[in-house]
């Protein structure tokens, strides 16, 4: 059972020594995996401004504008219980600057499992790592053990 002050990104470290400094803007997440973890924790903590700030300029939601995206995030905050996070695979930035992280997010809406595996793309924008896009598959749609997937075997 996780302690009350454990970071929701499931690092096993206290929130204040893990993702909180990123959420507060004290410092930037140092690599794509940390940024991904901090975004998961931000969903759990309803840190919606951080979720907006860490969207890359190329992310499709950016075109909708800050006010609308924040409104949508606010409306959906609290829908899910963020029960777990496992990083399954990662790939350093390629020549176009895109790094990948494959992760398994465990979440529940009331008692219904909404867990999914996502392969996310991240890019550094000069200030920090940002979320560009992701391909998401529900755990139910995946044949076999979702935790055994790699970037190469993830069905896209
Ligand atoms: Zn964390």
Image: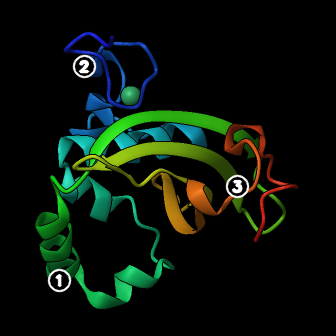
The quarter holding residue 44 reads top left
Question: Looking at the image, is mark 3 or mark 2 earlier in the sequence?
Answer: 2
| Residue 76: quarter of image | bottom left
Of labels 3 and 1, the one closer to you: 1
Determine the residue positioned at 33% across, 11% down: 1
Of the 4 image quadrants, the one containing the C terminus is bottom right
* 149 relative to 10, above or below: below
- Name, please, the residue furthest toward the bottom: 63
Q: Distance between the residues labelled 3 and 2?
A: 26 Å
Residue at the spot x=36%, y=22% of the render? 18
Q: Position of residue 151 (x, y in %)?
A: 80, 53
Q: Residues within 10 Å of mark 3 (few under 14, many from 20)?
A: many
* Label 3 vs 1, first from the N-terminus: 1
Q: Which residue is denoted by mark 1 in the rendering?
A: 68
Give the answer, above or below, for where 65 lies relative to 109.
below
In the image, farthest residue toward the front: 111
Q: Earlier in the sequence, mark 1 or mark 2?
A: 2
**SS label for mark 3:** strand
Q: Report how far apart the C-alphas of labels 1 and 2 lie in the structure.
A: 29 Å
Whether residue 89 is visible to the viewer of this picture, yes or no, is yes
Q: Which of 116 and 94 is in front in this view?
A: 116
Mark 1: few, some, or many residues within 10 Å (few <14, many ≥20)? few
Proximity of marks 3 and 2: CB atoms separated by less than 8 Å: no
Q: Name the residue under label 3.
A: 99
Residue 4 lies, with reference to residue 95, above or below; the image says above
Residue of label 2 = 16
């Amino acid at each position: 059972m996780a302690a009350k002050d454990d970071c929701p990104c499931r690092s096993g470290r206290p929130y204040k020594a893990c993702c909180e400094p990123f959420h507060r803007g004290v410092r930037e997440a140092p690599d794509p995996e940390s940024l991904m973890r901090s975004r998961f924790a931000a969903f759990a903590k309803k840190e919606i401004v951080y979720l907006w700030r860490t969207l890359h300029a190329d992310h499709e939601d950016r075109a909708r504008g800050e006010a609308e995206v924040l409104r949508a995030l606010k409306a959906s905050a609290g829908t899910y219980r963020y029960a777990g996070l496992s990083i399954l695979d990662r790939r350093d930035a390629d020549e176009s600057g895109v790094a990948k992280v494959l992760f398994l997010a465990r979440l529940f809406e009331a008692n219904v499992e909404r867990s999914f595996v996502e392969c996310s793309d991240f890019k550094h924008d000069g200030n920090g790592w940002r979320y560009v896009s992701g391909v998401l598959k529900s755990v139910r749609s995946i044949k076999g053990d979702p935790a055994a997937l790699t970037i190469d075997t993830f069905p896209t």
